Image (cartoon, helix red, strand yellow):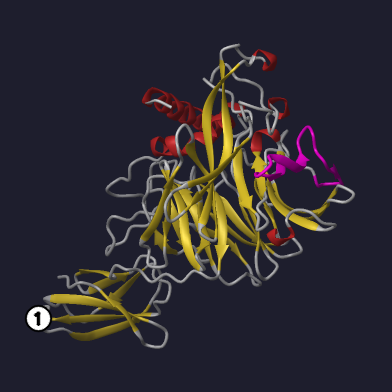
């Protein structure tokens, strides 16, 4: 795609998403261009202001350049899973920054990076070690537990990274991509010289960036893997292309198959990329399954097999999916049981927001290790945790107009930043923070007449992303030192005054 095409794609995306927000309902044009988010999200995310509104944005004395969104915990009950949350925060109101964000259950930030984008952000495993993965522009970025970049991947032309999903198994990464394909759209209500936005999944070797394989829906030089007639979205003459498919999730399975979710066909597919065979289709116009009561979904996101080792075939395969729904019905997270012998889909559990939210785009659904469930409400600024029985235990709200493409849970991330803590002083108060450090329990303040003559003058329990520590007097120089719960020194800031 040339520069003019990219610019047009960005403008379409921005206009459609804004109309969707203003209307407060699903807009097909908005969904049609959402998959171009890797090219367009930078336009949507407003540059961070020098100062920010205190009610919706964090400001830190020791980290003056960081302004993550301030989260409001609306409900918090007992029985929650012990862990943190990963959000792909996207600031729509221009009041804060956008980017990958890790937060605690109390809404306090653990780590934040201002990338001016907000879409996919996940914890994965690379070569047996936990890593963080997110999309930035046309690249997928992978960092280790020290927040050092260890890999980046870009899609090979004519494909473009669309930013919806990136999944790692072993040393390979699977990413969702799209490309423009000229196509006769007269059979579908469009022009004969039209354009289809073909969607696909590509596998890359993460260490080298080498392309291993591609699966795509349209397969323009052969038989379509997913026919255009499967689309639930009509051609819209207001947009320069037809987004007939709109892949928004991929799950590579250990046996080599792929589970693929397509929003605009309202269907989830189990495919064998080696043969292009579709093993089954769940939902849409050509479903392999019949549905029990409450099991149907529409405009779905984040479809995942609970146990990928089952390979998607068996008498009792469970699948989680976020059901955006349609026709004005409330959205929900659901767990389905799939019998691939009788091809019956049965509802196991549904998770509804107490406000009966109707989500136009985005969203996520995740089962947690203790049996709870986490639902991210996508374009609606909430994420919620539920008991196994479906009772809402936690409800957290982002600032107005903000969103998170997914909300995910982790209880295994241990961040040990390669960079030192940060400190600052205002009068007789010292401020200490360490962006991304997960093991800090206490802070020491070292102070003296100069940086060569420092001693411990205060110790304070960590109280949040930034800890304010009152001192008895002012000094000529300071440092802050992070301690673990056992008193181990984890890191020391540079001297400041």
**Residue 90 in picture, x, y percent from top left:** 46, 46
Who's the residue at 85% across and 57% down the image?
315
Who's the residue at 56% across and 30% down the image?
30
Q: Nearer the viewer, residue 274 or 167?
A: 274
Residue 293 shown in magenta: yes
The vertical placement of 229 against 383, above or below, is above
The vertical placement of 27 against 419, above or below, is above
Q: Is residue 313 visible?
A: yes
Q: Nearer the viewer, residue 90 or 449?
A: 90
Q: Is residue 69 visible?
A: no
Callout 1 secondary element: loop
Residue 222 shown in magenta: no
Residue marked by disc 1: 449
Badge count: 1
Say which quarter of the image contains residue 460: bottom left
Is 198 on the left or on the right of 434, as rendered?
right
**Residue 123 in picture, x, y percent from top left:** 51, 60
Quick one: quadrant of the N terminus? top left
Judge the density around disc 1: few (<14), some (14-19), many (≥20) Cα neighbours within 10 Å: few
Quick one: quadrant of the C terminus? bottom left
Q: Nearer the viewer, residue 264 or 72?
A: 264
Residue extent of the magenta highlight: 268-295
Who's the residue at 29% across and 61% down the image?
63
């Amino acid at each position: 795609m040339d520069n003019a095409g990219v610019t047009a794609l960005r403008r379409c995306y921005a206009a459609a998403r804004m109309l969707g927000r203003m209307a407060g309902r699903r807009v097909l044009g908005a969904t049609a261009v959402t998959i171009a988010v890797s090219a367009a999200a930078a336009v949507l995310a407003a540059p961070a202001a020098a100062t920010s509104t205190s009610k919706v944005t964090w400001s830190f004395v020791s980290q003056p350049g960081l302004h993550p969104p301030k989260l409001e915990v609306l409900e918090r009950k007992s029985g929650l899973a012990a862990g943190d949350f990963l959000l792909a925060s996207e600031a729509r109101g221009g009041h804060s920054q956008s980017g990958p964000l890790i937060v605690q259950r109390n809404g306090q930030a653990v780590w934040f990076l201002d990338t001016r984008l907000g879409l996919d952000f996940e914890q994965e495993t690379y070569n047996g070690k936990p890593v963080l993965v997110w999309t930035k522009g046309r690249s997928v970025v992978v960092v280790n537990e020290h927040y050092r970049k260890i890999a980046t991947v870009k899609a090979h032309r004519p494909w473009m990274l669309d930013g919806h999903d990136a999944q790692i198994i072993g040393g390979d990464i699977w990413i969702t991509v799209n490309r423009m394909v000229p196509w006769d759209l007269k059979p579908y209500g469009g022009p004969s010289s039209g354009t289809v936005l073909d969607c696909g999944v590509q596998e890359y070797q993460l260490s080298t960036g080498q392309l291993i394989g591609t699966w795509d829906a349209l397969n323009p030089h052969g038989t379509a893997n997913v026919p255009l007639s499967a689309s639930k979205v009509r051609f819209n003459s207001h947009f320069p292309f037809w987004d007939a498919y709109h892949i928004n999730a991929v799950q590579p399975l250990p046996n080599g198959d792929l589970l693929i979710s397509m929003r605009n066909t309202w269907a989830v597919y189990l495919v064998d990329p080696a043969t292009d065979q579709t093993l089954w289709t769940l939902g849409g116009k050509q479903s392999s399954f019949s549905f029990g009561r409450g099991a149907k979904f529409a405009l779905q996101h984040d479809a995942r097999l609970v146990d990928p080792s089952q390979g998607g075939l068996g008498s009792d395969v469970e699948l989680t999916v976020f059901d955006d729904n349609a026709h004005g019905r409330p959205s929900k997270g659901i767990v389905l049981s799939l019998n691939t012998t009788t091809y019956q889909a049965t509802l196991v559990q549904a998770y509804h927001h107490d406000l009966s939210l109707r989500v136009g785009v985005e969203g996520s659904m995740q089962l947690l290790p203790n049996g709870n469930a986490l639902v991210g409400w996508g374009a609606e600024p909430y994420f919620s945790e539920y008991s196994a029985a479906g009772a809402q235990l936690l409800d957290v709200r982002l600032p107005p107009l903000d969103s998170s493409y997914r909300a995910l849970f982790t209880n295994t991330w241990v961040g040990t930043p390669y960079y030192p803590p940060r400190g600052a002083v205002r009068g007789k108060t010292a401020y200490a923070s360490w962006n991304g450090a997960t093991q800090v329990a206490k802070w020491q303040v070292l102070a003296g007449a100069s940086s060569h003559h420092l001693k411990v003058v205060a110790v304070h329990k960590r109280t949040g992303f930034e800890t304010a520590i009152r001192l008895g007097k002012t000094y000529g120089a300071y440092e802050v030192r992070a301690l673990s719960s056992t008193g181990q020194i984890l890191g020391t800031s540079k001297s400041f005054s």
